Image (cartoon, rainbow, N blue to C red):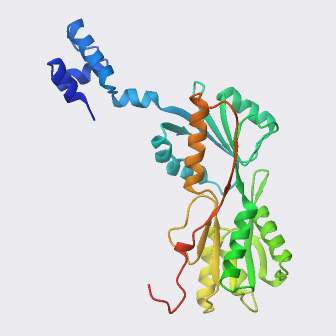
Amino acid sequence: MAGIKDIAASCGVSPATVSRVLNGDPMLSVTPAVRRAVEEEAARIGYKTPRQRRHDMLRVILMLSPIDKPGFEEQLLQYLSPLARRNGMVLSLSPYDEKADGLIALGEFSSEEIGYFQHIAESLLLINNLGSDYAYDSIMIDYSNAERQVLDHFLSLGIDRIGYIGGLFRRGGSLIGRRRAAEFRALLEEKGLFRGEWFRMGTMDEEHGYSAVMAMDEIPDGLFISDPDTERGVQRALRERSSEAETVIYTNFFIPECTGGTPLLIFSDDVWHTAFRMLGEKVKGEREQSISVFCPARLSENTASLKRGEEK
């Protein structure tokens, strides 16, 4: 790709002079003809300085409702920032001093909140919120499909003695964990597989996972676990009880580095790539019609733990 050295060679000046001209160095003393030649050559070959490229990036705000434990916001921003940059966007969790180019709102928000978002950025993308009139692009996660993938995974392995170890976490006005437990229970009941002693609810933490397994008279052959924190306790108890139960772990954004089971990833990279592409189309005026997309979760079976006795 053509760069500063090419412009310097074409204009008969040093690369340092080209850099200072394009960056608007007020201390640089060159003739108007040289300055014009450098700027015209840069425009001809399409070269932009890093500062100019940053200025051209779309500014996008990420608004998050409390759908996970505290701290996930900063983790998610750090994770998504490189993906956003590859799509020509700079993400922020806080509103800019000026209006942003676009806004991604993840979670449930009121019509009043969405109205405020529109004041910040005209182009909105709602995730898990269709809105009242389909006025904005939206992406919906198919949670029912996610839960069904888990049940199908167990049944495909010949496992029909299935349990659930989950927890609830209250954050503000939201009760995190309730929906995932209710939907999986409904699936088990639909298949006639629900057994109360194997469906354990408590706090969303490692200690509950451990105590829930240790309190079972008999451990089922398959366990769906509500979150990575609870999973750590479950795995510790399964090891102590010498159980080889198959486990699936519900995780919103990040697959745990060390897991003893199969992660169910709710928000895959494909969801975010789709979100950035859709928002970019609207901001740039490439599309006027709003669209809604349904995305399934992803059961990462290739990361499942090996059963005892199997070779790596």
**Nearer-the-camera pick, 12 or 28:** 12
Question: Residue at 22% of width from left, 24% of height from top?
Answer: 7
Residue, far top:
32
Image-based side of 245 in relation to 160, left or right: left
Up the image or down, 269 lies above or below 100; here it is: below
Quarter of the rendering occupied by the N terminus: top left
Q: Position of residue 241 (x, y in %)?
A: 63, 91
Image-based side of 14 in relation to 99, left or right: left
Which quadrant of the structure image shows residue 264? bottom right
Q: How many marks?
A: 0
Residue 152 visible? The answer is: yes
Image-based side of 139 in relation to 260, left or right: right
**Nearer-the-camera pick, 88 or 117:** 88
Up the image or down, 81 lies above or below 136; here it is: below
Question: Residue at 56% of width from left, 61% of height from top?
Answer: 254
Q: Position of residue 173 (x, y in %)?
A: 79, 51
Which quadrant of the structure image shows residue 230? bottom right
Q: Position of residue 140 (x, y in %)?
A: 71, 50
Question: Residue at 80% of width from left, 66% of height from top?
Answer: 183
Residue 101 visible? The answer is: no
Question: Residue at 25% of width from left, 24% of height from top?
Answer: 19
Quarter of the rendering occupied by the C terminus: bottom left
Image-based side of 190 in relation to 142, left or right: right
Which quadrant of the structure image shows residue 100? top right
**Nearer-the-camera pick, 97 or 136:** 136
